[in-house]
């Protein structure tokens, strides 16, 4: 039995909806096939965007979408992707499989996608191989509503009105695929590029500087010291891999034993240290917490599915990924004072995807269901909560058995999300709810075998069910979580 205390009166700030954000790169079958099939496809679509996928993403309440990369962003020249699609330049996507990129999905198509999904666009500019003028003109093309060459070009290409774009990234992984830069050099480049990114009309940019690769604390230190005052956000990338010694053998997405399950989840918890230590550096330069920590790439990265193109990063998605998602979303929510956005990599058919497609077929992965179960936290107030986590594991590899977060919505409903990482044992939580009396509880549970996953033949094998294993008590409620599960509770007080 684990004690769990939630205090309705102690609210710790708003959970930014954008921490449940996503990322779509021109990589493998994410954009093409996954999101965009073109207007002439037999697959039902709106302006080329798949209707089935758009409807599933709307249901999940996707708040923000990052595009066009990733490593692709620092090779992308936005002019290649506007104007008559038949005349658009065909280029080689040399980071991701050397495929032909025909640029049929460009700025207008992305903005239309965001409109259909009802989400904020987050555009990542090219600092690595693009010019300052090119980046400046992209922002002008997108957001300037007066008389200018870029506004005229936009109108000529069929969109008279300026769009609203808040989130703009100034380069991606500039320590690696975005230019192999030293932090000192990138900090100066960042300062130069961002100088020319203007706020036009009522559009106010939230400028995001390229941040560190996992444990590179020096990068954060240098960026905050030299460029902190010129940015609104600083990014961080961290991927969970079962085997961290080499990128050649990361581990299989579906075939793993108990030890690998716990090792993967233990690696997931490294996010906690990363968030806290990068935040501590940011606190020294920005005690007011003006600059947001933007975790714009996170998720599980395994070996590709056997027989698929290694450059496409296509992997299956199991209950282990559901737990990785649940833990990360809890960790991010609990740091809502500093973490203002996070983007799981990637949306469809790439890495820890929420949707997989095969021609006209699509399925929702266990990770999709976790985002759906957590969506009530978006914009809600984080509640002070404490859970005795217990431990689970095998041999020397141990993890907390339980993990949670709780929030209060504006209508007074509390939402609680709980994960049981233990493969073999159920766990009971005895909950004390301070500051209110419970009127009713409703719950959902996602559970299954550790390697349980959805296939195109059985797309709903792993899907949420009603959760009823709880009872009201004098202090709150007691709930028994089955092994290997994610639970969401809606508590009316
Ligand atoms: O998400 C796949 C790749 O991982 C991205 O392109 C890059 O930014 C990161 O290294």
Image: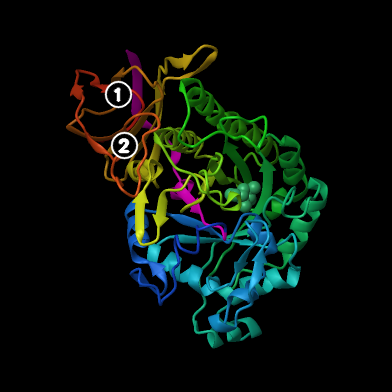
Q: In this rendering, is residue 425 above or below 283?
A: above
The relative height of residue 423 versus residue 39 in the rendered view (above or below) is above
Q: Indicate the quadrant where residue 492 lies.
A: top left
Tell which residue pokes out farthest to the front in this image. Answer: 307
User: Which of the image's four quarters has the N terminus?
Assistant: top left
- Give the magenta-colored segment's residue range: 1-26
Q: Main secondary structure of the magenta part?
A: strand
Give the residue drawn at x 56%, y 30%: 242
Please tell me the numbered disc located at residue 481: 1
The residues bearing labels 1 and 2 have C-alpha atoms spaced at a distance of 16 Å
Respond yes or no on whether mark 2 lies under 8 Å from ligand 1: no
Q: Position of residue 367 (x, y in %)?
A: 40, 42
**Residue 125 placed where, x, y %?**
65, 63
Q: Is residue 370 visible?
A: yes
Q: Nearer the viewer, residue 57 or 255?
A: 255
438 to the left or right of 447: left
Q: Is residue 76 above or below residue 342?
A: below
Q: Is residue 394 left or right of residue 283?
A: left
SS under mark 2: strand
Say what secondary structure mark 1 lies in. strand
Identify the residue shown where x is 81% and y is 47%.
182
Question: Is 179 covered by the magenta stretch?
Answer: no
The residue singled out by tag 2 in the image is 415
Dot 1 surroundings within 10 Å: few (below 14), some, or many (20 or more)?
many
Residue 141's spot in the image, x, y percent? 60, 76
Residue density around tag 2, few if under 14, some if 14–19, many if 20 or more, within 10 Å: many
Is residue 5 found inside the magenta-colored segment of the image? Answer: yes
């Amino acid at each position: 039995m684990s004690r769990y205390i939630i205090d309705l009166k102690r609210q710790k700030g708003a959970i930014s909806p954008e921490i449940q954000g996503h990322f779509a790169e021109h990589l493998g079958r994410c954009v093409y096939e996954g999101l965009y099939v073109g207007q002439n496809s037999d697959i039902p679509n709106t302006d080329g965007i798949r209707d089935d996928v758009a409807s599933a993403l709307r249901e999940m309440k996707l708040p923000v979408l990052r595009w066009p990369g990733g490593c692709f962003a620092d090779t992308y020249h936005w002019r290649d992707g506007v104007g008559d699609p038949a005349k658009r330049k065909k280029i080689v996507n040399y980071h991701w499989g050397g495929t032909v990129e025909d640029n049929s999905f460009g700025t207008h198509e992305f903005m239309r996608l965001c409109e259909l999904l009802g989400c904020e666009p987050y555009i990542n500019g090219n600092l690595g191989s693009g010019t300052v003028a090119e980046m400046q003109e992209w922002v002008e093309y997108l957001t300037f509503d007066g008389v200018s060459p870029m506004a005229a070009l936009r109108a000529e290409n069929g969109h008279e009105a300026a769009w609203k774009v808040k989130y703009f990234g100034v380069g991606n992984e500039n320590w690696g695929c975005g230019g192999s830069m030293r932090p000192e050099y990138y900090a100066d480049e960042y300062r130069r590029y961002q100088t020319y990114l203007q706020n036009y009309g009522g559009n106010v940019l939230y400028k995001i500087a390229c941040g560190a690769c996992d444990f590179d604390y020096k990068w954060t230190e240098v960026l905050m010291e030299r460029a902190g005052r010129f940015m609104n956000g600083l990014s961080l990338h961290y991927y969970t891999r079962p085997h961290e010694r080499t990128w050649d053998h990361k581990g299989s997405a579906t075939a793993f034993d108990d030890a690998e399950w716990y090792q993967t989840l233990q690696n997931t918890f490294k996010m906690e240290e990363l968030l806290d230590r990068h935040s501590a550096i940011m606190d020294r330069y920005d005690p007011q917490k003006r600059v947001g920590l933007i975790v714009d790439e996170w998720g599980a990265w395994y070996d590709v599915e056997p027989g698929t193109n290694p450059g496409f990063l296509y992997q299956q998605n199991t209950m282990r990924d559901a737990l990785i998602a649940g833990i990360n979303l809890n960790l991010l929510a609990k740091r809502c004072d500093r973490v203002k956005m996070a983007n799981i990599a990637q949306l469809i058919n790439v890495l820890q995807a929420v949707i997989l497609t095969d021609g006209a077929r699509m399925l929702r992965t266990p990770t999709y269901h976790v985002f759906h179960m957590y969506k009530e936290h978006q914009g809600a107030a984080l509640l002070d909560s404490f859970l005795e986590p217990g431990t689970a594991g095998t041999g020397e590899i141990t993890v907390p058995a339980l993990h949670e977060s709780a929030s209060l919505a504006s209508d007074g409903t509390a939402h609680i999300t709980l994960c049981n990482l233990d493969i073999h044992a159920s766990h009971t939580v005895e909950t004390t709810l301070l500051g209110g009396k419970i009127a009713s509880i409703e719950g959902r549970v996602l559970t299954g075998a550790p390697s349980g996953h959805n296939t195109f033949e059985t797309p709903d094998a792993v899907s949420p069910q009603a959760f009823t294993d709880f009872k009201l008590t004098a202090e709150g409620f007691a709930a028994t979580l089955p092994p290997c599960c994610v639970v969401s509770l809606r508590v009316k007080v």
